[in-house]
Amino acid sequence: MVRLRFLGCGDAFGSGGRFQTCFLVASPSATFLVDCGASSMIAMRRFAVDPNAVDAVFVTHLHGDHFGGLPFLLLDAQLVSRRTRPLVLAGPPGLGQRLSEAMEVMFPGSSTVRRSFPVEIVELPARVATTVGAVTVTPFEMVHWCGAPPYALRLEVDGKVLAYTGDTEWVDAIVSAARGADLFVAEAYFHDKRMKYHLDWATLAAHLPEIAARRVVLTHLSADMLGRPPPSGVEVAEDGREIAL
């Protein structure tokens, strides 16, 4: 069985008191994170998740609320959790440089310290299926300005398919990323307000029949969405919620 737990499903600004984006996926052959926002170490402690159990982190894009927890994860592994197992960080081109820059801004000297565990950074090409451990990941380029290619991810592990939009305005590549997925986690930042670089529920809903995912969960909700009843026919993420596939 594959399980996904929302450690954080909030937007960049903590709407609704939610942690920033971080999903934990656990299956018989792999344990990994999808995104690791700046608050993710707090969320992992809150929900009693052992960071040393994580084999890899798959990053959709290089905004702080989606990858800003990586410096804390690496420093925790070195100084607190005493990690010895390898860790893979996979994401868009530019991940390695941006991570080094972020670490130097927040903790000068930390990017060059010799670690007690191997770290492999994999920069993923768009629309190419790449195997990372037991996971096959295929990125699809989205539209969301962050200084590097933003991705939606299609992740396959132990016979299940998980798709996640990341942050993006509507692009047809979302259909390719999510078609027929066992679980489709989709941004729905606003209800029906069109906004550049972000996805609204009304636009997403119009395309759900074409996507035909088995299960749809909305995430990254703004105060506008949180103040409304949940849309019918889909689910809404909550910090700490677990879904079995």
Image: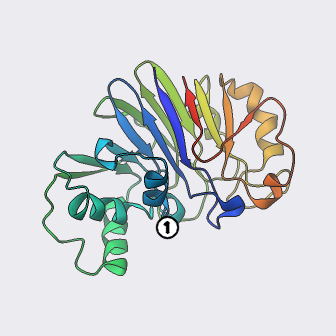
Q: Is residue 201 above or below residue 101?
A: above
Residue 34: percent from left, percent from top: 46, 45
Nearer to me, 190 or 129: 190
Q: Nearer the viewer, residue 135 or 16?
A: 16
Q: Is residue 42 left or right of residue 74?
A: right
Q: Residue at x 34, y 59 (%)?
A: 73
Up-down relation of residue 6 to residue 21 (above or below): above
Q: Residues within 10 Å of mark 1 (few under 14, many from 20)?
A: few
Mark 1 sits on what residue? 147
Residue 237: quadrant of the picture: top right
Q: Residue at x 48, y 47 (%)?
A: 47
The image shows residue 189 at horizontal and vertical percentages of 73, 54
Within the image, what quadrant is residue 230 found in? top right
**Quadrant position of the N terminus in the picture:** top left
Residue 234: image quadrant is: top right
- Classify residue 128 as left or right of residue 203: left
Identified by mark 1, the residue type is Gly
Residue at 46 percent across and 33 percent down: it is: 155
Instruction: State how many labels appear.
Output: 1
- In this view, the residue in front, 162 or 242, is 242
